[in-house]
Image (cartoon, rainbow, N blue to C red):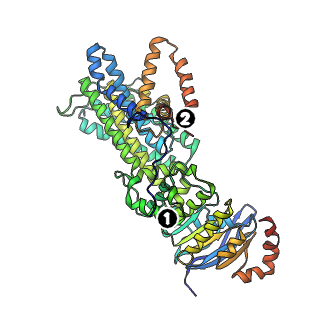
Amino acid sequence: MAEALLEIDGLTKRFGGVVAADAISLMLPAGELHAIIGPNGAGKSTLIAQLTGEVTPDSGRIRFDGQEITNVPVYRRSQLGLARSFQVTTLFPDFTALVNVALSVQAHSGHSFRFWRNARNEIALREPARAALARVGLADRAATLVADLSHGERRQLEIAMALAGRPRMLLLDEPMAGMGPEESIRLVELLRALKGDITVMLIEHDIDAVFALADRISVLVYGRIIATGGLAAIRSNPAVREAYLGEGAANG
Amino acid sequence: MSPPPKPPVRTGWSIGIVTPRIGLNIAVIAALAIVPAYAALTGNAFTLTLFTRVVILAIAALSLNLIMGFGGMVSFGHAAYLGIGGYAVGILAKEGIGSGFVQWPIAVGAAALYALVVGALSLRTRGVYFIMITLAFAQMVYYVAIGLDRYGGDDGLTIYHRSEFGGLVDLSNRTVFYYLCFGLLLIAIYLVWRVVNSRFGMVIQGARSNERRMRAIGFPTFRYRLVCFVIAGAMCGLAGALLANHTSFISPAMMHWTRSGDLIVMVVLGGMQAMFGPLVGALTLLVLEEGLSRLTEYSNLILGPLLLVVAISIHDGIDGLITGRRGG
């Protein structure tokens, strides 16, 4: 078996009486594209938030690349190579697309206590940023303010920013949400191209995209993982059909 | 290869390469440069006094713009740095240490240290809490100054000798002092411009725009914001040292909370995130104040509503007005 890049062990988080994460354990080998599906309120976003460090688990451990990161701060996890995209696009609206990505490059190129040189035309920041924009198909939108980008373009920009930090692993929180069919197809193509190079945890409601991309799928219901496995196993799992796929297909 | 980037679209207008913003900046700089000559010609010494004050408070407003305009940190206690810088000069002068080489670094250092303490505590909060904490700290310093009986307490303290620089510059010469302040202002504007566009500045502006996202992409934002806060405090401490020399007097009134409010008004009036905005704002506010107070004793009744109109109608201040940039 390939070495695990991400190991989640007994992760538990309660908000009052609600158990948002109930002893979640998962192993993601390097290079895997692992999808998490589940109905609304299943705790998918809470899981992501614990992995990125925005929410501290009540108990359980997270190991990334052999290192315990359960109590490591958000920015440090990003520097270790754990990048994320947000469910609701949260970019820097008053900057251009290029500057948004350049900031991400800058975050991963040493400290930023550099007070003199103009960062806006620094080749070392701009070139990798341009490359990341080109990778997601936004090369010709580099000089556009984020405020003037379409919804789909902003989602692509989210991915470009995550990629610009040369991450080992991507946490994608519903990257297809609100995208048109054409944009979704392009994003699926992009993720397919990344497969193998970068380990991906994909949280997504678009079942077609999930089945088109995922190596393995975990099904999260009420904070618990009720099944993990390959596509065929998940499709035929009776508990999954009952809890999610049967009714979930109707709800989108 | 990707195509070359298109230049960003500007909604403003221009005459040749001179945009209205550059035009206004040049006009302001030129006007300030000839103030001493004008004052000498007309024999009106007060003009020089007024504009020295404009230039010094512009440095203070500039430092506020660095954290407030570019960094999104609305400090409502910025006058405290003026006071700390001023009191450093005044206290040292009273204790017989008249050298500016000692006074000024201590003024700047004390203000920076104070900023470090205030920043370390206040930058963990957001929004209105941040505003209240910076105000509370400034009020604390204000009351400490009132309690300093040896240095005049509530009445303040007269400084009998301006800072001495060993014959290098003579600050008691009003024209020399004016040009020194003016030169320091220009240097400060240049420094802020460099800092804002550097990698450090990008982190500061990114944290204003979306701090959560900045942490998510790997920036420990707190330490950058704290350093920015200290830089602004140090710069304003220098303005305080200049102000004490200018008025030859220090008193707690230097750091009354209304003074902090004035500095915010200058920044907003001139245009946040505009490099020359604080200078334009300080100039406009102080000259308006002076002019209106000569016309009527109810000048604030006119000034107040005027500022209200400006704040409501033009989001980016005077800079927004002339560049046609609409704020949000």
The foreground one among B6 and B244 is B6
Q: Is residue A81 visible?
A: yes
Q: Nearer the viewer, mark 1 or mark 2?
A: 1
Tag on residue B315? Answer: 2
Specify whether A117 is left or right of A160: left
The foreground one among A124 and A226 is A124
Whether marks 1 and 2 lie on the same chain? no
Question: In what element is the residue under mark 1?
Answer: helix
Q: Please give the name of the residue rendered at 38% of the width and 59% of the height, measured from the top-left corner.
A: A123
- Quadrant hosting residue B32: top left
The foreground one among A14 and A156 is A156
**Residue position marked by numbered label 1 in the rendering:** A132
Q: From this view, report whether residue A23 is shown above or below residue B8.
A: below
- Spot occupied by residue B62 in the image (x, y as percentages of width and height): 41, 37
Q: Chain of mark 2?
A: B
- Spot occupied by residue B249 in the image (x, y as percentages of width and height): 34, 25
Task: Measure the C-alpha gap from mark 1 to mark 2.
Answer: 34 Å
Specify whether A81 is left or right of B161: right
Q: Quadrant of the N terminus of chain B?
A: bottom left
- Quadrant hosting residue A46: bottom right
Q: Which residue type carries mark 2?
A: His
Specify whether B280 is left or right of A150: left
Question: In what element is the residue under mark 2?
Answer: loop
Q: From this view, report whether residue B225 is shown above or below residue B307.
A: below
Q: Chain of mark 1?
A: A
Q: Quadrant of the C terminus of chain B?
A: top right
Q: Which residue type carries mark 1?
A: Ala
- Quadrant hosting residue A170: bottom right
